[in-house]
Amino acid sequence: MLKVKNLHACVAENKSIKILNGLDLYIRKGEVHVIMGPNGGGKSTLANILMGRPSYEITNGEVEFNGKSILDLAPDARSHLGMFLAFQYPVEVPGVRPWQFLKASLDAKAEANREKKISVREFTKIFNQKVEEVGINSNLIKRSLNEGFSGGEKKRNEILQLQIINPLLAIMDETDSGLDIDALRIISDGINSMRSNQRSFLIVTHYQRLLNYVKPDFVHILVGGMIVDSGGPDLALKIENSGYKDYIK
Amino acid sequence: MPDIFFSHSIDQFNILFNNAKKKSFFDSKVNEIKNIAWDYFLSTGLPLHRRGNEEWKYTNLNPLSETKFTIDADIDIDFSSITKLIPFSDNWHNIVFINGNYFSKLSENSTKTNDINIVPLSSSKLPDEFATLANPDLSPFTALNTAFFSEGIIIEIPDNNKVSKDLNIVFLTSQSSENLATFPRVFLKCGENSNLNFIESYINLSSGNNLTLPVVEIVQSKNSKINHYRIQLENKKSFNIGTTRIEQKENSNFNSTTFSTAALIGRNDLHVLLQEPHSTCGLYGLYITSGDQQQDNEISTTHVKHDCTSKQFYKGILSGRSKAVFSGKILVEKDAQKTDADQKDLNLLLSRDCEVDTKPSLEIYADDVICAHGATAGNVDMNTLFYLQTRGLDLETAKEILIRGFADEILDRFSPKDLHCFLSDYIDDIIPELRDQSDTIGTF
Ligand SMILES: Nc1ncnc2c1ncn2[C@@H]1O[C@H](COP(=O)(O)OP(=O)(O)OP(=O)(O)O)[C@@H](O)[C@H]1O
Ligand SMILES: [Mg+2]
């Protein structure tokens, strides 16, 4: 589903800041991949570059999604193909209501893929149901998107969007950070309920505790802009015990 | 100091005034007020000198003084379509003026009901307070309005009346109007324990350069409540310089929301006098400018007595080479202890060449007072745009959504449903133009 080959990237405005230095990653349909790594290693940069954030420049390498090169595509076009990013720091969007926003999001996707738009009634039903499942206060969700939300509420809201947009590849950047134990449960349940042989996950996390709920197929260690080690769930346990010192020269 | 500017600013109105006088059918009492106003205007002229003149520092009125206006207007209106072009609802009590004239076809016939008394100014005995809130010598423009008004509306609400229908007054400039000057005049007195929702709009359907100089006076008696909505939808060649004065008696509540856009020079000069204790007033506004437009907001609140709460909250969206001014004054007099006053002006600047001048001015002579103010001017944030794009919205749509989101906070205060729909459609129509004139959004 996702092929990242020898990816090199730097900051667009300052090309001397090189962040990804030859990164390879291969995710097949239905797989759950976890990326761990020390702060500043380049995890968020990778996640953002996969979605097409314009502040980075790709200097070498290739990214394919379902066999198609995506590096020239705008973020919205990548979204229409079925890619999704849950942000490490979800953005506050004043005056924009989650309901309208998500409806517009689905409509844009339907239009791009020449599908029929979902009716207001059907959408409202799904929306309300997901809001309840994710455990967001229904008054909060009537207000502006993320504005004044607590850290945890913002993360729940990312999960709400994930569940409604229903992508093929969900990239989740530290969605489990800053969550209380109930929220962690909800989010894990959310991910598990969406797991299927058609949908893949790329989960960035610092904590092994998430992996008690979500069993990954692969765990990768990202240091200095490269994947320096890959393995199964045991690798996360090992990191939990001994940290990254073995990987940092 | 008679100089070339000065005489220039007087000359053309001089001719008009003599014309107007010939047609005047007012009684001697009114004519006396008019003469006083005219004399005052002769002594000041238009405020063309900006240096050292705080109130007009940011506003160049030369384009106004260089235009020759007329006060004679035809009415060319297609009634069948007109109600779609103005705020209008069958649920409201509608009063429509076209080119300065009271237009009975679109105005409710029975204007005298138990709960409200609405009379065209020309056939009404003027209330005692008329022209005392907006004194002719308040400004050259109040003077001009007073000297020139030929029609207007007097509204009186008796005590103990909750007026059930929203009152909607529309001042319309018709399609083919060119160089037309109109002087709308409204006087409203709300009795004790009475309530009213009052919509006031200035709509210009022409593409000519016209001048609209409205003056509105509102007296609020004890325990009364008014929700006021003011809409200025001009055209990019026209001038709209409005004066609104409100006096609030004890324990009254005045809420006003304005939407001002599209004038070459627009100015909303709004002053609320909190004359007696325990009153509240909330002044909200949205201004949108593009092209070469300018919109001034001269907003001021005076706290005379104790325990009053006031709020000023304005938002501006600017694009192109346009300009806006927010001048927010809060005056707290020495007897106004326990005043709670709050002021905020937030601006979204969509282009490099637009400019907003925000001038907060707080004058406080009491000691037990809470007074807060804040102002910002910023661009649409790149990070936010990316966030919306990752959800499948294209860049253009994402920008539109953010502009609209910025406007909504004020727009949503237009509570009458039909009014909200009207403005919502209007804003949706102009957003693409704002976006197209923008060069800051999408940059870092
Ligand atoms: N736009 C940018 N401009 C300058 N430096 C940047 C930019 N984006 C990322 N960096 C730098 O690149 C490095 C990698 O950042 P990134 O956010 O990808 O790390 P991370 O692995 O997600 O870290 P964390 O675990 O703390 O979230 C950091 O040193 C960061 O400061
Ligand atoms: Mg990160």
Image: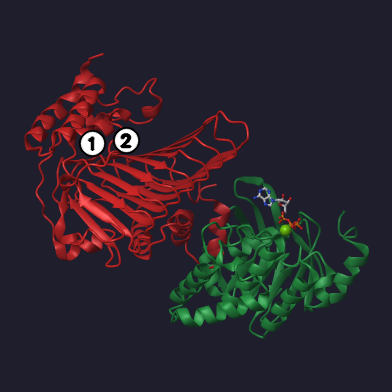
- What residue is shown at x 39% (from left), y 20% (from top)? B52
Does A41 sit left or right of B24 as displayed?
Answer: right
Residue bearing mark 2: B134
Of residues B129 and B362, the one nearer the viewer is B129
N-terminal-most mark, 1 or 2: 2
- What residue is shown at x 39% (from left), y 28% (from top)? B55
Question: Which chain has been coloured green in this picture?
Answer: A
Looking at the image, is B45 positioned above or below residue B21?
Answer: above
Residue bearing mark 1: B145
Looking at the image, is A41 positioned above or below residue B262?
Answer: below
Looking at the image, is A99 positioned above or below residue B385?
Answer: below
Question: What distance separates the C-alpha of mark 1 from that of mark 2?
Answer: 10 Å
Q: What kind of colouring is applied to the model shown?
A: by chain
Identify the subunit bearing mark 1.
Answer: B
Of residues B32 and A162, the one nearer the viewer is B32
Does A74 sit left or right of A182 as displayed?
Answer: left
Q: Where in the figure is residue B185, as x and y percent of width and height?
A: 24, 43
Q: Tag 1: residue type?
A: Asn
Residue A224 sits in which quadrant?
A: bottom right
Determine if the C-beta at disc 2 is less than 8 A from ligand 1.
no
Q: What element carries label 2?
A: loop
Of residues A208 and B101, the one nearer the viewer is B101
Question: Which chain has been coloured red in this picture?
Answer: B
Q: Residue B156 carries which label?
A: none
Circles 1, 2 touching at the beta carbon (< 8 Å): yes
Q: Where in the figure is residue B319, as x and y percent of width and height?
A: 40, 45
Looking at the image, is B123 positioned above or below residue B335?
Answer: below
Q: Tag 2: residue type?
A: Ala
* Camera-nearest label, 1 or 2: 2
